[in-house]
Every structure is written in C-alpha cells, then in structure tokens.
Image (tube, rainbow, N blue to C red):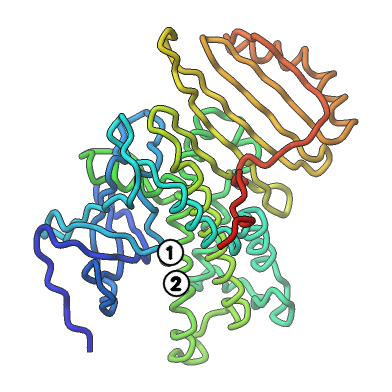
Amino acid sequence: MRQPLELTLGLRLELKLESTTARSTTTTETIARIRPAGGDSVWSAPVRLQLLMPGNSRPQGSAPAAAGTAPPTPTTPVTAEVIALRPIPTLRLLPATGTPTPGGGVVMTHDWVVQQLRTHLPQAQALAEGLGHWVQRLSSPTPASPKGLAPDSGAATDPLMARLTRLLNRLPDSATLTDPGRLQQRVEGSGIWLEARLAQLAHTPGATTTLADDLKGQLLQIAEQLRRHHQDQVTADAAQRSLLSSAASKALEKEAEGMLKQLISLQLQPLEQPAEQPRWVLELPYREGGGVNTVQAEIERERRPEDAEEAGWTIRLRLDLPELGPLAIRLTFKEQQLRASLVAEQATTAALLRHQLPLLRHQLEARELEIASLHAGQGRTPDPARPVGPLFSEQA
C-alpha cells in the first residue's frame, strides 16, 4: 500500500499530469501523480494540485507566451517545487536545463529539444486524421462495423461517448475561422497554450480565460477516461457497460495519445527561439462536410532592428482543400504595411488565385490595410508544423 507523501514548502517533486479541470474562471485544478525529485520512488496515487508555469503568465489581450518548460503530459515527467499548501497544494514547475536568455527566460538546449521530439513525433497523429476517425466512429451504423459503436441513440447518455461528442461538436466550421474575434478564440484554445492559460488563471485574479474549449485539455480528459474504461467495463454489469467495444476503446485511446503527442511536438518546436523573437506552431481543426480538416499555422515575430520602431510579424498558413488542393499563404505585417503571397500546388488553382487578386486587394484595403505587395503563383507548399532539421538522421 502506498504511503501518502508529506508535502512541505520548498520540496521538489517530479510529477506526471493526468487531467486538468477549470472549476471557475479563477481556479484551476490538476490531477497528477507525484514523487520526490532525484530518485526512482514509486509514483503516488493521483492527487489534486494547482500548477504555476515559470514565465508563462501573460497580461490580458497579449499573445500567449511560449512555454518556458516542458509541457507536463502523461508521458513527460517534470520537476516542480511546492510553494503553497493551502487551500490546495500549489506547485511551481521548474524549467528544464537550458540557456538563459537576455530577457531572463530560458531557451531549451538543442539536444534536449531533439530528444523530446524524437520521443513524441514518431507516434504523433495529425489532428485531422485522429478527429476524423472519431467522427466516423460516432456515425457508425452497426456494432459489427470496424468503428465499434452500438446503433442506437443511447450514446448521448454514455459519459465517454458524450465527452467525445462534445469535443467534436465544439470544433468550428470554416466560416467561424473567417471571423477575426472567433478565430482568436480558436487560436488561444488550440491546445499549445494550455499551460500558459493555467498560469494566467493562477496568477490573475478575475481572469476571464476559460479552458472548457481548450483542445489539449479536452484530449487529456478523454485519454484519462479511456484509460479507466477497461477496468470499469470489467466491474460493471451488462446494463451499465459502455456502448463502446473494447477494440474501439483501445483504438480511441491510441488516437488520443497520438494527438496529444502531436500537440506536444508543436509545443516543443519553438523552445529554442530567443525570447525577443518568439515563434509558435499550431494546427486549427475544423469541421468540413462529414469530416475534419486543419489549418496549419506558424506565427513568428521578427527580431526588431535597433533603428526600427516595432518588430514585424509573419504568419504562414497551409490548407489542403478538397477542390483546390494544397495552398500556402504567407502574410508579413511590418511598418504598418502588409505583404501577402499565395502559392498553390495545382496550376488551375494558381490561375484562379491570380484572377482573384484584384478582389482580394479590394477586400484588404476595405479593412484599412496598406498593401505593400500581393502575389499568387504555383509552387510547393511546405508544412509549417513539420520540424526543420535532421532530427532522425543523426547517429545515436
């Protein structure tokens, strides 16, 4: 039988995050397993904690800060220090070994980032693929099908199925992503800033951030519920068993873990960036027809020259549209001027974009944007969310 771990102020612990729950706009609770740092003790039973991330608190209205430490996940233990015991234990996550930056932040060492990417990236699953499989499973007509769901409408009353349905119903449609305000909400809830949002809630009394729609938070909860599913099925009687078959639940668990690894890989990629030149990589899933598609995005702030009043921003987007094929968009905003480039892999799509450039210019100018350049052409459309560098070709 595990002995309870006695917590004292200043005690350093290792922890593995299992789930997060925002009870209100100002209180965030985390369920984690803990053990003393620097050893190989047995992990504790799940305990309720509050977490603070170092350097990740951000003022209202600003862009979320890049993670200053490894994001806590079920497969990535991190080190934390106890800083309060009441009303519930509060731990401050400690940054992994890295290089201090002039701004006081921490840049992860290259070897550490590469090692983490090698751990997570091979089993990562694209969000569109994983969520698309879940849409198919929820619409499966018969229990004999590979999707593994019962045919009746009782899935809505099954807790696990209800959680899956809720996540999929919260995905936006393509029209939502064209609205600036709602697009900002989707970007903030994309999952890569979960830990930063936790820190904001902990540090900012009265903050209005809600985690209900955060993609990583939802996936963590689903993964934990799926891990408990098999044991619950063994102990439940026939009337109480989940509508989800054992094979389907295992497939869902594997897909949930794969999508979490995808989000972790996206979080890891910018960690080598200096604090004065932040970069974020994300995927925005959205419903399209009967499936799920994603917008892949990279947001980067340029290093500000000494003689410049402000730094420029660059956004790279990639979409793979059913009728138009892969499309890459690069937007650069600098010195109050916008430069836009659209590249399509299909010649017919490139011709269509060139034909629509005058209309696009008119629409941008109607938003009081000064257009420095506007270009459309044919070419390759690299994935901005794919890590750059020989991560897997190096000798071990």
The percent position of residue 68, horizontal first and vertical second, equals 35, 44
Up the image or down, 26 lies above or below 299; here it is below
Q: Amino acid type of disc 1?
A: Gln
Q: Amino acid type of disc 2?
A: Gln
The percent position of residue 195, horizontal first and vertical second, equals 36, 49
Instruction: Please report the residue visible at 42 percent of the width from the left and 44 percent of the height from the top.
Output: 193
Tell me if label 2 and label 1 are in contact, CB under 8 Å: yes
**Front one among 134 and 242:** 134
Q: Can residue 356 be seen in this view?
A: yes
Instruction: Please report the residue visible at 11 percent of the width from the left and 60 percent of the height from the top.
Output: 85
Residue reaching furthest front?
395
Up the image or down, 127 lies above or below 76; here it is above
Q: How many marks?
A: 2
Q: Can residue 86 be seen in this view?
A: no
Circle 1 sits on which residue? Answer: 221
Decide: few, some or many residues near mark 1? Use Cα within 10 Å; few <14, some 14-19, many ≥20: some
Left or right: 389 in relation to 212:
right
Regarding mark 2 in the picture, which secondary structure is present there?
helix
Decide: few, some or many residues near mark 2? Use Cα within 10 Å; few <14, some 14-19, many ≥20: some
Left or right: 182 in relation to 107:
right
Regarding mark 1 in the picture, which secondary structure is present there?
helix
**Quadrant including the C terminus:** bottom right
